[in-house]
Image: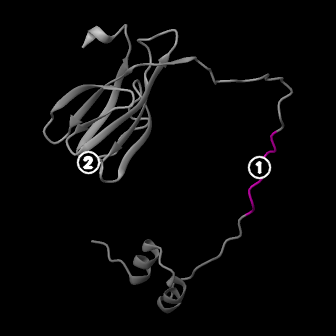
Amino acid sequence: MRSWGLASVILAAGLAPVATLAQDTGVVIEMIEIEPLEFETLSTPDIELGDVSSESVVAATVAQGAMLRGLDKLTGERVDFDLANGFSTFMGPLRVDMAQCRHPADNATGEAYAFLTIIEDRGEGDTLFQGWMIASSPALEALDHARYDVWVLRCKTSATEGND
């Protein structure tokens, strides 16, 4: 079994009073001069990169409402509900308000974007969520609640009305 001196323990722990303790124990500490590092300076390339744009704009259409899904994480109960624009519903103690649901104009069954407000204590408490939820990326803008989850499935349009 190896015996550790007090100076070794303090050195290993990275504590400040090592220099004083090192003098008392006879340990010699040397300071070593280190040359500063030199870095190569990079030049900009002579290649013309051109304009880069990752933004795309797609025309959106306001739908009649949205199909939402709620989950009680404690009981595992899942509920799907339709919510028309401008209306509210309750899920447990949460009030879910639907302002609008939008979808791409050229693809009604494509992506859905819903503007929701979710308030606790049946609408009398704090606002837990307010913003756009995206059907394909529910975690991008999500409700942060210990027990309940709510997310958008799709917009309600005349093409999808009969698919309930």
- In percent of width and height, residue 32 lies at 67, 71
10 Å crowding of disc 2: few (<14), some (14-19), many (20+) = few
Quadrant in the rendering for residue 111? top left
Labels 2 and 1: the sequence-earlier one: 1
Q: In the picture shown, does residue 128 fall above or below 37?
A: above
Position of 93 with respect to 4 (left or right) is left
- Which numbered circle lies on residue 151? none
Q: Camera-side residue: 83 or 7?
A: 83
Looking at the picture, which amino acid does disc 2 mark? Ala
Q: Distance between the residues labelled 2 and 1?
A: 50 Å
- In percent of width and height, residue 149 lies at 28, 38
- In percent of width and height, residue 36 lies at 75, 61
Mark 1 residue element: loop
Give the tally of numbered discs: 2
The magenta segment is 35-42
Q: Mark 1 points at which residue?
A: 39
Q: Which residue lies at the image location 71% right of the left edge and 70% below the top edge? A: 33
Magenta residues: mostly which secondary structure?
loop
Q: Residue furthest bottom?
A: 24
User: Is residue 37 on the magenta stretch?
Assistant: yes
Q: Which residue lies at the image location 35% right of the left edge and 37% below the top edge? A: 97
Position of 48 with respect to 8 (left or right) is right
User: Is residue 9 on the magenta stretch?
Assistant: no
Quarter of the C terminus within the rendering: top left
Looking at the picture, which amino acid does disc 1 mark? Phe
Q: Camera-side residue: 153 or 22?
A: 153
Mark 2 residue element: loop
Q: In the picture shown, does residue 8 fall above or below 156?
A: below
Q: Which residue lies furthest to the front in this view?
A: 86
- In percent of width and height, residue 40 lies at 79, 45
Position of 122 with respect to 104 (left or right) is left
Q: Mark 2 points at which residue?
A: 146
